Image (cartoon, rainbow, N blue to C red):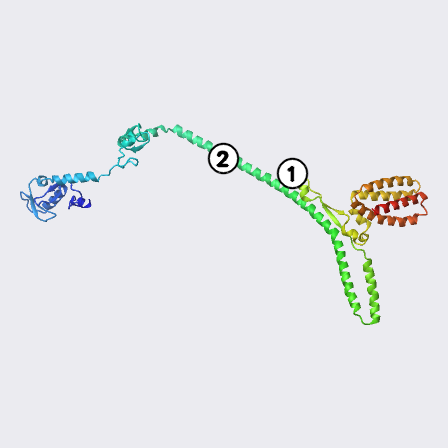
Amino acid sequence: MDNLEEDLTCSVCYSLFSDPRVLPCSHTFCKTCLDNLLQVSTNYSIWRPLRLPLKCPNCRSVVELPPAGVDALPTNVSLRAIVEKYQMDSEPRPPSCPEHHRQPLNMYCIQDRQLICGLCLTVGQHHGHPVDDLQAAFIREKLTPSQLLKRLSEERWAQVCELGEQLEQEKACCEGVVRQDRQEVNQFFQTLEVVLAGKRQACLDALDKAGAEVLRAYDPLIHQVKELQEEQLDLVSLGSSVEDEDSPLVFLEKVHLFRERVEEFIKTPLPSVMTLSVTPRAAEYLQQHWPVVTIGSLEEAPVPKVRCCARCGGAGSEAGGGRSSRGVQDVWGELQPTTSVVLLGLLLLLAVLWVNPVGGASLGFSLMSRLSHLVHSLSSELITCVWDTVGRAYTAAGVAVDRWSSQLSAVGVRVFEHLAALFKTLTSR
């Protein structure tokens, strides 16, 4: 195809032949190219003969043209027909239909606004659709944009602009509401965080206070036990040094001192093991009271009052009378409220008998019977703890009774005897 195009190209203008004319030398050129060559050659001619000379661009031979010039040259009809056919074959062909092979898309479907082929219109998916020529449809719709632009009036534009401003205002208003609500939410939950932090700190403070009570209760006892341990280690070391003493006099002196220290150490009462109960427990308290707490009543939510209560029993009661090292006032603070009532009743009874031995006898018997009933209702563990302290108080009271025996009547003596019998009975349980 490229070789054919080269043969159909003029050697002067290098384009396809346009109105090809044949020179007497049999070479063919475009009529326009020959006119230009003839004009140039005549401009340089000194004289003008009847025939016009022309030099062939291919063979360089000088040919004489008729007086009519290039128009008198014969047309190469065959070459012109070949050029026209070549130009027709070189034009771009319409695209083929993707559904129907080698069918040109030569119709415009108005409904679907696309090019279709004849089979698409007759048997395809565009059957029955209105069609038109593409160029005709283009010409028909050429003025449509200007007509549509005329319909876009200034009033419509003003309405659209006003609507846009209203929407912007509504948007700004809603954004302000959202921003305000965001601030309210942050402030609300910050307040809740502050209240919760306060409640948490209050609970921790209560536990810190209970921890301080534990330290006050146990640290002196632990310190005392450590001193006893150090004393016993010191005595063991001293005993070893005494055994190694060779001088009889020095040995006897050291043995005497060692005996005194050992006797004193053995007589030293051992501290009792204090068992404290931390109440209420945090997990149980929170599970019991906090599930019913609402957000509105969060500030009134209860905080546990943690305290350490003494529990009697355990190794301390077997420590060889270890409780005797603690005073009545210390033990009194560890007792339960019921125990305190019992001791208070006993002290009141002693006070009444001392003031009025005779008149207080009947009152003493009545009070003793009620105290006996109350004591019997106590648990065995609490009774042991209570009467351990009461026994020591009774011992002290017995010494006082010996001093007051000259002033007490026989009735008072019988009351104390009854009280002593009751003490012995309860302590033997």
Where disc 1 sits, the SS reads helix
Q: Measured from the top left, where is residue 309 in percent x and y?
A: 75, 46
Tag 2 residue: 172
Residue lying furthest left: 50
Q: Give residue 191's quadrant in the image.
A: top right
Q: Residues within 10 Å of mark 2 (few under 14, many from 20)?
A: few
Q: Measured from the top left, where is residue 183 in percent x and y?
A: 56, 38
Name which residue lies at 79% across and 68% down.
243
Name which residue lies at 82% across and 41% down.
374
Q: Nearer the viewer, mark 1 or mark 2?
A: 1
Tag 1 residue: 291
Q: Residues within 10 Å of mark 1 (few under 14, many from 20)?
A: few
Q: Give residue 142's quadrant in the image.
A: top left
Q: Measured from the top left, where is residue 181 in percent x and y?
A: 55, 36
Name which residue lies at 81% across and 45% down.
383
Where disc 2 sits, the SS reads helix
